[in-house]
Image (cartoon, rainbow, N blue to C red):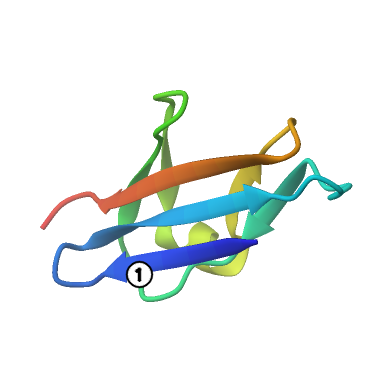
Amino acid sequence: MVVQFNRPDLRGGFVLAFRRSKSPYEKARFKLQGLDPTAQYVVTDLDTGKKARLSASELIEKGLPIAMPDRPSSAVLVYECLGK
């Protein structure tokens, strides 16, 4: 289960993901909405501190990759628009 909280006024937001105890899926991609399609974004995993730079087109078309090997588990990923 995944929920996106987009803040267009801040040009960013966050994604909250949950892996349920019986879920067979360790990885998935989730298409984001409300992004500037021409921008680049920095995505930070708040659990690991890892950062990735992704294009809005990738986040919109292919989706944000999220991996959660443990079950049950959760993840919070913050995304911020680079530039203006």
Q: Which amino acid does label 1 sit on?
A: Leu
Name the residue: 78% across, 41% down: 26
Name the residue: 43% across, 45% down: 77
Q: Where is residue 78 in the image (x, y as percent from the top left)?
A: 35, 47
Query: In the rendered image of this protein, does residue 69 appear above or below residue 81?
Result: above
Q: In this rendering, would 75 be left or right of 50?
A: right
Query: In the rendered image of this protein, does residue 24 appear above or below residue 29?
Result: above
Quarter occupied by residue 39: bottom left
Q: In this rendering, would 31 be left or right of 9?
A: right
Q: Nearer the viewer, residue 84 or 24?
A: 24
Quarter occupied by residue 11: bottom left
Helix, strand or loop at label 1? It is loop
Assess disc 1: are there few (<14), some (14-19) or many (≥20) residues with their C-alpha within 10 Å of its C-alpha. many
Query: In the rendered image of this protein, does residue 79 appear above or below residue 63?
Result: above
Q: Position of residue 15 (x, y in %)?
A: 45, 55
Q: In this rendering, would 78 be left or right of 2?
A: left
Tell me the quarter of the image containing the C terminus.
bottom left
Name the residue: 46% across, 23% down: 48
Q: Position of residue 66 (x, y in %)?
A: 62, 44
Name the residue: 45% across, 65% down: 4
Quarter occupied by residue 44: top left
Q: Where is residue 20 in the image (x, y as percent from the top left)?
A: 74, 50
Q: Residue furthest bottom?
A: 34
Q: According to the image, label 1 marks what residue?
A: 35
Query: In the rendered image of this protein, does residue 16 appear above or below residue 46?
Result: below
Q: Which of 61 and 44 is in front in this view?
A: 44
Tell me the quarter of the image containing the N terminus.
bottom right
